[in-house]
Image (tube, rainbow, N blue to C red):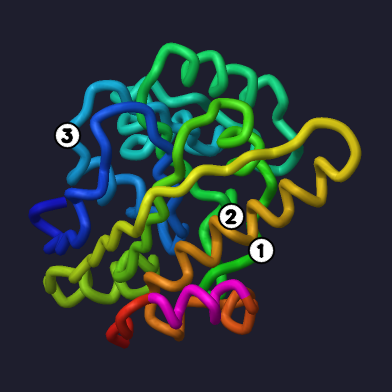
Amino acid sequence: MNMIADIEVHGSEKLPNGNVIAAANHLGRLDTAALLCIIDREDIIMPVAEKYKNHPLFGAIGRAVNAIWLNRFEADYAALRKILERMKQGGMLVIAPEGTRSKTEALQEAKLGVAFLAGKSGYPVLPVAVTGTEDRAILENLKRFKKSKIIVQAGELFHIEIPNGKGREEAMRLATDEIMCQIGVLLPEKYRGVYADHPRLKELEKQHLPVSS
């Protein structure tokens, strides 16, 4: 990573030492590697798409962090149970709510998994915005022997509560939107995608200093 990219980090002091969910947008294949470069912890919990299990690079990264291999094309309840079991032991869950990298290079609709895990575990959520990891841009820079500039921005910790019983799924959807809007407000406008006009993001935007494009 040091050979192919310069990573600029903002807000690292907001990362607590204890249990936390780092929820990040997913632009490209290097998102995970970039985050692992700047996280100095031994208790990382990280789900990784099963298709990368035998990949020479990403498979090696997954094995190095004892990844939980996840089937991202269906509700992988077995993987969710494994994640929760690991979370009970304590640690830092690093996860992308979108589930897969964005083909539009901007936020896409997130799945409910992260809200479910946050509600079940009681872990606080740390929104993390990553830019500069788009596969297209990384490849173009590699062809020109140019380093890519990756920027990682951490937001403010917040908690999620999901009630049991009636209205649970709606509560998870609202919590998922909250997570994505908290990530979105840290991103330049061109990266906000399907959440660009979300009322909650607009509300958060008023509370934040302008984000550079």
Disc 2 + disc 3, Cβ < 8 Å = no
> How packed is label 2: few (under 14 Cα within 10 Å), some, or many (20 or more)?
many
Tell me the residue that label 1 is attached to: 109
Residue drawn where x is 33% and y is 69% of the image? 131
Measure how far apart labels 3 and 1 are at the Cα level.
30 Å
Tell me the residue that label 3 is attached to: 40
At label 3, the amino acid type is Asp
- Numbered disc 2: secondary structure: loop
Disc 1 + disc 2, Cβ < 8 Å = yes
211 sits to left or right of 205: left
Residue drawn where x is 71% and y is 43% of the image? 73
Residue interval drawn in magenta: 200-207
- Mark drawn on residue 98: 2
Which of the 4 image quadrants contains residue 9? Answer: bottom left
Asked if the magenta segment contains residue 206, the reply would be yes
At label 1, the amino acid type is Glu
Residue drawn where x is 17% and y is 34% of the image? 40
Residue drawn where x is 47% and y is 20% of the image? 87
Asked if the magenta segment contains residue 8, the reply would be no
Q: Residue furthest right?
A: 166
Up/down of 18 relative to 3, above or below: above
